[in-house]
Image (cartoon, rainbow, N blue to C red):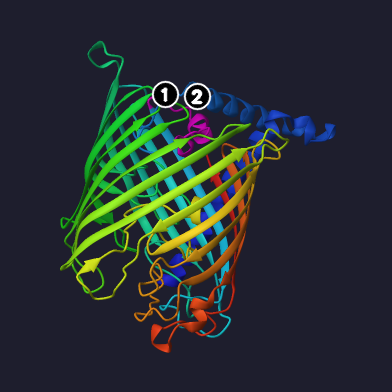
Amino acid sequence: MSQTEENQKVGIVSAIATTIAMWLIVGVALAEEPSRWISPPLKQLTSFPLEVASDIKQRADARTEQNLAESADAVLIQHRELKWSRYLRSAAHLPDWLDLGLENRTRFESYDHPWRTSQQVGNGQTDAQIALRSRVRVGVGGNGPVRFLFEGQDSRAYLNDAPGGFRDSTTVNEFDIVQLLGSLTVHNVLGTGLRTDFHFGRMTMDLGRRRLVARNDFRNTTNAFDGFHWQINQGQTWRFRTFIVEPVIRDEVRLDEQHNKLLFWGTYFESRHLPWFQVEAYYLGLNDKRATNATPHRTYATLGGRLYKDPAPGEPDYEVESSWQIGTRGETDHFAHFQHVDLGYTFSFPWTPRLVFHYDYASGDRQPDDSQSESFDTLFGARRWEYGPTGIWGPFFRTNLSSPGWRIIVTPSPGWILQVKHRVWFLAQAADFFGSSGLRDPTGQAGNSLGHDVELRAQWAINGNLDIDVGYVHWFKGSYFDRLPPSAGLPSGGNKDADYFYLQLRVRV
């Protein structure tokens, strides 16, 4: 069987599995209020499966609300990644100490006028793909002090065989282990009321606002790390974390593995003593000896902090984050920095609108080929919630960037979130690279105006197990793309405005 036929077969199986899961959720929804959906003559015919589905739902929701089985990665990642009713687990009548969950996310996405140097395609070329990500979680331990977790993930992209289609290890990573870890939890350490957790194995992590270390959400593949993590906290008041890991190197087809020439470590402190003045401080170290012509040996430290106040109706909110990097990059000294500011206000109006103004600055290299490296490295961070969709899109990175912008967010009803975003994009240094596009004018004569974009996004969480996300971006490209020299490698038509659209469905059982 050819690779193409095998991929098609897997795609068909995944589609069938998604359909079955969707119908299971629909059945549970019917079980809540069948009179809303089913006419009286059909009620007797459907009463038995509806009763079964209702029983599954009641048991699954009860377990979710009571949090009977905290997972081994509960303190490592965002809580919303874990809080969903395990219908499959309840249907199988599994004991409280055993967790089982399946997730499938299918996304159609398309954009035109590529700008990456790797996409040398015809004028007006459109890149349309279907991204499929499937996960299975198996947890053991329940509420005991020792817990174990396995999470497998399969990430694929279809319709990407056309000339110029974007594909790399951020879009495809087949049949891999994204988490395989154990945890030890101690409550009320020595009678102090503190809790401590120790993790060992392969894990995913979210640190702070997730700008430097993140378990990827929108992206089709996921960052993972092999090593050790320890945390101690006092409820929601404060928390201290430290870790030493080897980042996992993703491969599109082969099993992922850590690299013994890549080491990552750090500490992270969070304080929420004052709701209007919450504080985070961190130190992150990286030693990447995988030196190649494209990626020189990186050895540097990242130090920073974050101050913020959470949004609340009728109140202003803010966020300030500052990160500084020092060390070496190849044979050159490395000194770079990143600055972020948010100023927002949530109005006490219907739909609770929130207006927020942003500004980001990530340093770039002032002079090519000198003795100083100044391009900020975002390490293992995420970008979607701040800069726009990633996936096959995602032109903007936290490096060599200066960008003001604003957005307005409304919640017309429970489960719905609507957003409008507008940002203006500039290169911080005209002579440095534009993100990961491969584009660069070493003379700086192309200028630094990348243009501006408008994004529309709608999210609908039907329930904890089913959600839909749809978005559209129009990028008004700036004069930088018109003034690039032919040697820069801009694809034909890459200076024209670009449109991006996606429609995403996620099912969790």
Dot 2 or dot 1: first in sequence order is 2
> Tag count in the figure?
2
Res 389 visible:
no
Quadrant of the image occupied by residue 124 = bottom right
Q: What's the residue at 71%, 40% (across, down)? A: 412
Q: Residue furthest bottom?
A: 486
Query: Which portion, as a residue range, is magenta?
Result: 79-97
Q: State which quarter of the image contains the N terminus.
A: bottom left
Q: How crowded is mark 2: few (under 14 residues within 10 Å), some or many (20 or more)?
A: some
Q: In the rendered image of this protein, does residue 473 appear above or below residue 176?
A: below
Position of 428 with respect to 344 (left or right) is: left
Is residue 81 within the magenta segment?
Answer: yes
Image x and y of residue 477, in percent: 55, 73
Under circle 2, the secondary element is helix
Q: In the rendered image of this protein, does residue 310 appear above or below residue 365?
A: above
For the residues labelled 2 and 1, the Cα–Cα distance comes to: 8 Å
Is residue 77 within the magenta segment?
Answer: no
Q: Residues within 10 Å of mark 1 (few under 14, many from 20)?
A: some
Image x and y of residue 464, in percent: 57, 36
Q: Nearer the viewer, residue 212 or 173?
A: 212
Disc 2 target residue: 63
Q: Mark 2 belongs to which amino acid?
A: Arg
Position of 160 with respect to 179 (left or right) is: right
Q: In the rendered image of this protein, does residue 406 appear above or below residue 328?
A: above
